[in-house]
Image (cartoon, coloured by chain):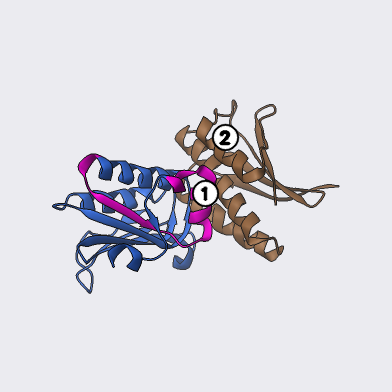
Chain colours: A brown, B blue
Amino acid sequence: MKDQVLRLGFHGEPAHLTIVRAFVGSVLRTLEQPEQMIADLRLAISELAAVLVNSDAGEADLEFIVDDGEFRLAVSGPDPMPSIPEETVALVKALTGDRLLSPSGRWIVGPFR
Amino acid sequence: MHHQAPLGPGRNGELRWTQHGPDDTIGPEVTEQLEITSSERSGWTVLTATGEIDLASVDYLQSALDAAFAKVDPQVVIDLSAVSFLDSTGLRALIGAHRRGEDEGAKVALVVNGGPVERLLEITGVDASLNIHPTLESVTG
């Protein structure tokens, strides 16, 4: 069963990173998720949002999806999506066990455990 | 609106950098993102960072590093014990400080004792190349 649990608009401002991270951390703690998973997800958000900011990508949607109990992060909005630097790809893959998909203008990262 | 506090002596002669987020949107407990204090200890310039280091706040860390390196024969220790978040932009600043120290013959050390900072250093493999200590005392004696 797939269930979208949270969707946030991101307006490409560096200062919004802090707010989004704080909000996501608060929500996931309410859902009693493990601190390590929350920390990894917060880091992935920051890294991918930085790509958007550095690309002047404007607004984007951040979706937090629960699928069979596993959390994934999806990022969409800019058309086309900016390319992700290799070092960012490597870091996000290290966080999620080698999963970072970019199907049709959408980044999907996860699962976070 | 973002603002950087004036660089100047604090109550104990420390230098202090603070960075705040948009004051008009949420409360100060969330918007105060990063504070860096600079003090002297056993010949070391100690930069103590508290809060989150990311794209929005890394300039404040860089400003503090630049000021520390501007001193004669700098020895710089960056205490990250109270940093609750660090991303790759902050990591780049730390690696830059390490390389600058090598280039200029200056000692540069980090204090890291677990948490998200240690996690990032480990998964990027950077921990093997930086001068990392578990406590401030293990650097300054």
Q: Is residue A96 left or right of residue B56?
A: right
Let me know if residue A58 appears in the view: no
Quadrant in the rendering for residue A63: top right
Look at the image and give the residue range highlighted in magenta: B103-128
Please tell me which residue lies in front, B108 or A98. Answer: B108
Q: Chain of mark 2?
A: A
* Total numbered badges shown on the rendered structure: 2
Please tell me which residue lies in front, B76 or A109. Answer: B76
Quadrant in the rendering for residue A25: bottom right
Q: Is residue A33 left or right of residue B102?
A: right
Task: Say if A107 sits above or below B134 in the image.
Answer: above
Please tell me which residue lies in front, A83 or B72. Answer: B72
> Can you say which quadrant of the picture contains the C terminus of chain B?
bottom left
Query: Under tag 2, what secondary structure?
Result: helix
* Circles 2 and 1: CB atoms closer than 8 Å: no
Q: Which mark is residue B122?
A: 1
User: Which residue type does callout 2 highlight?
Assistant: Val
How would you rate the neighbour count of disc 1 (Cα within 10 Å): few for under 14, some for 14-19, many for 20 or more? few
Q: CA distance from mark 2 to mark 1?
A: 16 Å
**Residue at the location (27% across, 54% down)?**
B64
Q: Are marks 2 and 1 on the same chain?
A: no
According to the image, label 2 marks what residue?
A89
User: Which residue type does callout 1 highlight?
Assistant: Glu
Residue B97 location, x and y as percent? 31, 46
How would you rate the neighbour count of disc 2 (Cα within 10 Å): few for under 14, some for 14-19, many for 20 or more? some
Residue B102 location, x and y as percent? 27, 42
Q: Chain of mark 1?
A: B
Let me know if residue A104 appears in the view: yes
